Amino acid sequence: VHIPFANNGHAIIAKRVIEVDAELQKDAVKRTLAVEDNQLVATFNTLTVRLARLVVNGFLENVDLIARTIGEFGE
């Protein structure tokens, strides 16, 4: 999943915020986060398609909250 941000700094902030929270099902979900230019790149490996949907949905909700917070309060 590639999430574009306004700049590299915002993508790094998002990565740092999300990295604080570990996956709840560590044996069933592997998440890798990286920043490429102004994009937050997330890779997920899950045991089932249903779990992938749930994990990505939760991830996108977090990204939405982070992006709105950055927009409201800046860096």
Image (cartoon, helix red, strand yellow):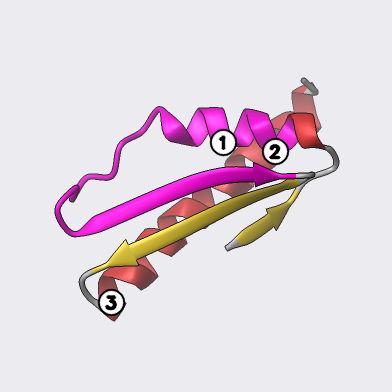
Label 3, on which residue? 50
Marks 3 and 1, how far apart in space?
A: 24 Å
User: Which residue sits furthest left?
Assistant: 27
- The residue nearer to you, when weighing 69 against 7, is 7
Secondary structure category for the residue under label 2: helix
Which is nearer the N-term, disc 3 or disc 2?
Answer: 2
Secondary structure category for the residue under label 1: helix
Q: Is the residue 59 above or below the residue 44 in the image?
A: above
Question: Residue 45 at x, y = what percent?
Answer: 33, 64
Label 1, on which residue? 15
Quadrant housing the N terminus: bottom right
Bin the neighbour count of mark 1 within 10 Å (Cα to Cα): few under 14, some 14-19, many 20 and up: many
15 horizontally vs 10: left or right: left
Which region is colored magenta?
10-36
User: Which residue sits furthest right?
Assistant: 6
Total numbered labels: 3
Question: Residue 3 at x, y = what percent?
Answer: 67, 55
Label 2, on which residue? 11
